[in-house]
Amino acid sequence: MDITLNKPDVGRYTNANHIEFHKTSLIICDRHANVINAPDLLAGYHEKVTQEEGVYKWTRSSEFTEKKAEVDRERDNILSGIMDALHASSKHFDPSIRDNAKHVLNLVNNYGDLTHAGYDAETAGIDSIVTKLNGRDYIYAVQALHLEPWLTELTRLNSLFKGYAADAEQEQVRKPDISPKTVRRETDEALRNVTNRVTALIDLNGPGAYVQFVDEFNVHVNHYNTLVHEHYGRLHARTDISSGEVDTIAVQPYTGEPVYVIPKVRIRKTGKDGTVTVVELRFSEDFTVGYKNNVDPGSATITITGIGKYAGKIITTFNIAAEV
């Protein structure tokens, strides 16, 4: 009878699944330590699993690092929104609006694409841009383009980011001396040393003494490999938003400039147990918008397009009031 140890797909396990997989693998190995008969290898495996668990717990507790990344995404969205508004205004029918938009664009473009810059470079760049746009050379253009709310929010997020960055820096004092990636690799290698020994013993002595260990280990591996395949299936599945609900948009005043309204979009999701939950989608993370006929009085059109985990489109309208 030929028996073979199944190979765990450890490279695709999430961090949580990876440490739980190894903790259970260690229990199985300990239970069959007498047939494995390699105390040095098992001791090395114990050491690496304990080390990875410590690194994992530190990573999970690193709340300020996570908050910093979340605020960074929010300020990236604001920067992108400002650039979209400026590009749209640079094509406005009113020459003064076009000129003001180009004036501000020339400044912002000098800083490059800050949304893809490093944390420090983006923070310093935002500070500099906001200072200059609030100065006398740009303040008239900012007011004409109604950028004040955007700059206020960008300033708030940049200040919040600095606070979280300082807190995250303090966390580094408690940082383990080994990276999560490295400790994962070393834990995998420690398990491989054990399973390679078992395979060699099977080749040398035959399967008899090792059948129970192999069966138990293979069931364990199959369970986690199934988990990872289900995870990747869910990860790449995109939810269609085309049947979603959009709040009615109030009549917007005519200003002679493009009117940008971010709609409230919700979808209903049905769980495995049949429970229906209502999920409000987030602009720029779950959907983006496009506008048509959004300058002159009358009916304007918004096309809502799912992005990220979502697909499909919703078309809705709103009215721009007649010029008084």
Image: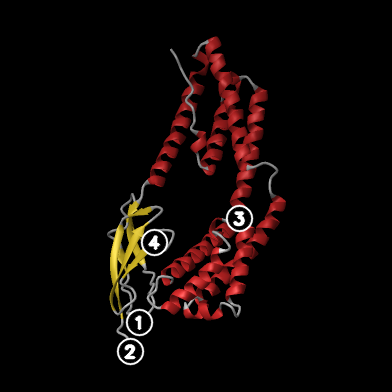
Circle 1: element type:
loop
Residue 153 on image: x %, y %: 53, 72
Label 3 or label 2, whichever comes before in sequence order: 3
Which image quadrant is residue 151 in?
A: bottom right
Please say if 294 is above or below 313: below
Label 3 or label 1, whichever comes before in sequence order: 3
Separation of disc 4 and disc 3 at Cα? Answer: 25 Å
Separation of disc 2 and disc 4 at Cα? Answer: 31 Å
Mark 2 touching mark 4, by CB under 8 A?
Answer: no
Please say if 250 is above or below 180: below
Q: Amino acid at mark 2?
A: Val
Q: Which residue is mark 3?
A: 118
Q: Which residue is mark 4?
A: 288
Separation of disc 2 and disc 1 at Cα? Answer: 8 Å
Residue 144 on image: x %, y %: 48, 80
Q: In this orientation, does residue 274 appear?
A: yes
**Along the viewing direction, whichever of 171 and 156 lies nearer the viewer:** 156
Separation of disc 3 and disc 2 at Cα? Answer: 47 Å
Q: Which residue is mark 2?
A: 324
Circle 2: element type:
loop
Label 4 or label 1, whichever comes before in sequence order: 1
